[in-house]
Image: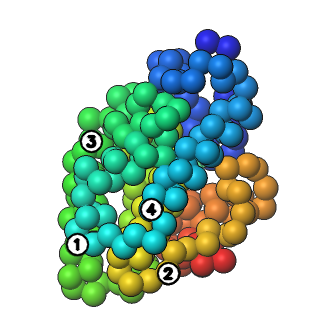
Amino acid sequence: MGLDLKYIKGQTPLDEEEKEGLKIKTISTVAELNEFEQQNIEKAEIWIYGKVFSVDKVLDEAFIKSIHKRMLGDVWKWAGNFRSTNKNIGVDKAQIQIELRKLIDDCKFWIKNDRFPSEEIAIRFKHRLVSIHLFPNGNGRHSRILGNLLAVSLGKDEFSWGRANLVSTGNSRTNYISALKKADNNEIEPLLKFARS
Ligand SMILES: Nc1ncnc2c1ncn2[C@@H]1O[C@H](COP(=O)(O)OP(=O)(O)OP(=O)(O)O)[C@@H](O)[C@H]1O
Ligand SMILES: [Mg+2]
């Protein structure tokens, strides 16, 4: 396939097998791909808009997968399915379901015991989701939407995530990735601050 996905800072390159999951055969450039993905994601956001899901609904494996499918299912065959290959980021493919289970249990424990403020729980959830890297692609965008959904289910507002297009390179993207790296070292505050900015 002629699709040359340029390596954008912080983005995971797709391997050949995953490129074959492209449903729309007319897509031949990265710009076109971005456009189709964006349209699909906007459709998912419209479906989500105004809905308040329960915490138990948001912290559910099937629901988490279904949101990814809604976001990218028009474009990619593998949308909503855990990745079957290893990446330079994320846990081993065999550990994805186990690590997600742990994350869900941890979140439920934090909520039940008021372990962290609600917004911080939503951000910790977002960060661990993207660190596990459930899917072949779309993990950043999926984790930001899931972070929003958990915040709303806990009675908080959605995050603004720097009010910028994080998919492209730029200041906002640089700040976002640097905040994620700090969160990797268990310093959550910068990502929380960025999410609210
Ligand atoms: N050091 C890091 N720690 C945790 N997460 C990271 C780190 N570096 C990158 N990421 C996350 O991985 C994402 C890239 O994964 P992927 O390409 O699957 O998501 P995406 O939705 O296509 O990206 P984007 O966030 O640009 O929309 C980045 O957006 C970021 O959220
Ligand atoms: Mg990507």
Looking at the picture, tell me which residue is in the foreground, 102 or 67. 67
Which one is closest to the eye, mark 1 or mark 4? 4
Q: Which residue is mark 1?
A: 108
Q: Which residue is mark 4?
A: 48
The three-letter code of the residue at mark 4 reads Ile
> Considering the numbered disc 1 on the image, is that residue within a helix, a strand or a loop?
helix
Q: Which mark is residue 157?
A: 2
Q: Is mark 3 within 8 Å of ligand 1?
A: no
Q: Which residue is mark 3?
A: 95
Earlier in the chain: of badge 3 and badge 2, it is 3
Earlier in the chain: of badge 3 and badge 4, it is 4
Kindly identify the residue that appears in the image at 32 percent across and 70 percent down: 53
Cα separation, mark 1 vs mark 3, equals: 20 Å
Q: Which mark is residue 67?
A: none
Earlier in the chain: of badge 1 and badge 2, it is 1
Kindly identify the residue that appears in the image at 34 percent across and 37 percent down: 82
